[in-house]
Image (cartoon, grey):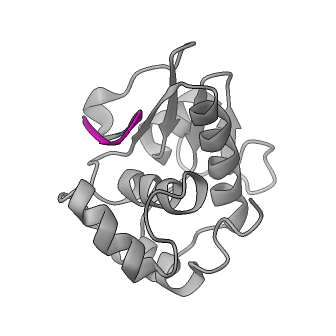
Amino acid sequence: MQEVYERVFVTNDMSCIRGNGDVAVVHACKSPCHQGRVGYRGKLPSDHPNYLVLEDEYDLFLNIIDPPVPLFKPPLFSHFMDYAIKHWSAGRKLIIHCNQGESRAPSLAMLFLAKGASVIDNTSFDSARLMFEELYPRYNPGKGIETYFSKNWSVLGSDF
């Protein structure tokens, strides 16, 4: 687990914990977290009320994978940003994890630091990435999330 900024941590699923009054956790992995919490195996019907996200008081479970071709849905990122801003502003630690701690979790942390906390440059994905890599050298985005963020950076977080 690495603190990339004051009270913002990025990690892998070995550090998966449940949130509490001091810590809010973003579980950025379909398997095992989203599947386990929502209670399904395989695929979830896209009309299920928790298809993209399930939010408990201190935990946000995201149905997010990182395929080579981006399949992301914008509401997932909006919900993440709302959750992250709410808990970080309330003084909680924000732990963001994915399976390996290299792509999805750090990409979300970078998005939050650029567009939510405004502590790294948000002019472009490339400029945010350069600054974020100084904070988290292990950043290794998958092709899908890298492509999605690069093409959609200007609109990601635009409703905040």
The magenta-colored residue range is 1-8
Nearer to the camera, 131 or 55: 131
Residue 3 is covered by the magenta coloring: yes
Image location of residue 4, percent across then percent down: 31, 45
Q: Is residue 54 above or below residue 110?
A: above
Nearer to the camera, 81 or 31: 81
Name the residue rendered at 56%, 25% in the picture. Answer: 91
Q: Could you tell me what secondary structure mostly forms the magenta stretch? A: strand
Residue 40 in view in this figure: no
Name the residue rendered at 51%, 16% in the picture. Answer: 22
Q: Is residue 125 above or below residue 40?
A: below
Residue 25 in view in this figure: yes
Image location of residue 146, percent across then percent down: 40, 76
Residue 51 is covered by the magenta coloring: no
- The answer to whether residue 51 is left or right of residue 60 is right
- The answer to whether residue 35 is left or right of residue 15 is right
Quadrant containing the C terminus in the rendered view: bottom right
Image location of residue 130, percent across then percent down: 29, 74
